Amino acid sequence: MLDASKHYDFTIKFGEETAGLDAEGEVVATSDIRPALPEVEAVLPRFTRAIEQIPPAYSAIKVEGKRAYDRARAGEVVEMAARQVTVYSLFVAGPLHCDSENEITLSAHVSKGTYIRSLARDIACALGTVGHVTMLRRTKAGPFSLDQAISLDKLNEIGKGAPAKDIILPLEAGLVDIPALDLSPDAAKAIQQGRVLTGVATKDGLYWARDAEMRALALVEQIDGELRTVRGFNL
């Protein structure tokens, strides 16, 4: 799940760049240039691919053993190393307001490690101006979308002792993009013991193994005829 791609809706306000690239930071750069909608649409394909991205200084990335945001808040000049990320899709989701707001809302599907604040900064730069994020909403992470989200009120109820059985999803909900592999009782026992199996008739790749009672046992990987446990569930 940590490696899963994510979907976001976010709003860029043009004309001001802030220290944290969000609405809370102090303004560090300004520009009078305000792009029109066709200009924004024309520049988005430049970012819809594998790109090099410099994360914000106000981020949780560790720099010499210390969080970058801690260094930035202490007044240090933080040099962030560029990293490669992938933007799978990027499109206009909301209108460009030509009034004093000068904002546009975009939707993006991105790989692990992508910083939307940096993406907004770089889009503004490509348009010859500066900008920062005023709204950011994650709409999907891996197989989970807002359809499965719960409210903070519901979460607070669980924290106070309310039963979670109707809220917590089964383990299999996080494995929908990984094929299941049915095992015989002997093979299931071997996998639970962490033993390497041979002779399992399946293609090379990652699977989640289950027993005859359809219980999830482990993430397993078949390589060159050998089936090995990647992560046992031990439920």
Image (cartoon, rainbow, N blue to C red):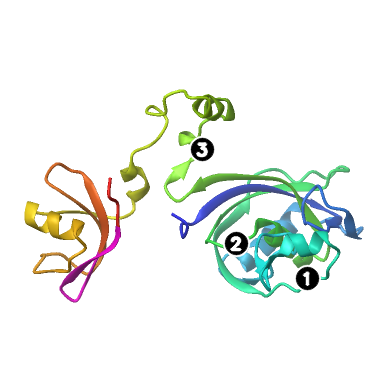
Per the image, is 199 magenta? no
- The image quarter containing residue 226 is bottom left
Say how many tags the image has.
Answer: 3
Marks 2 & 1, CB-CB < 8 Å contact: no
Q: Nearer the viewer, residue 145 or 11?
A: 145
Dot 2 alpha-carbon crowd within 10 angstroms: few under 14, some 14 to 19, many 20 or more: many
Per the image, is 228 magenta? yes
Segment tinted magenta in the rendering: 221-231
Residue 7 located left or right of residue 217: right
- What whole-number distance in Å separates the C-alpha atoms at marks 1 and 3? 35 Å
Q: Along the polypeptide, which appears first: circle 3 or circle 2?
A: 2
Q: Residue at x 14, y 54 (%)?
A: 188
Residue 155 located left or right of residue 62: left
Q: Amino acid at mark 3?
A: Leu
Mark 2 falls on what kind of element? Answer: loop
| Residue identifier under label 2 | 114
Discs 1/3, front: 1
- What whole-number distance in Å separates the C-alpha atoms at marks 3 and 2? 20 Å
Coordinates of residue 106 in the picture (x, y in percent) = 65, 50
| Residue identifier under label 1 | 78
Dot 1 alpha-carbon crowd within 10 angstroms: few under 14, some 14 to 19, many 20 or more: some
| Residue identifier under label 3 | 146
Coordinates of residue 89 in the picture (x, y in percent) = 55, 58
Mark 1 falls on what kind of element? Answer: loop
Discs 2/1, front: 1
Residue 96 located left or right of residue 7: right
Q: Nearer the viewer, residue 7 or 14?
A: 7
Q: Residue at x 33, y 44 (%)?
A: 171
Q: Along the polypeptide, which appears first: circle 2 or circle 1?
A: 1
Q: Residue at x 77, y 56 (%)?
A: 21
Q: Residue at x 48, y 41 (%)?
A: 145
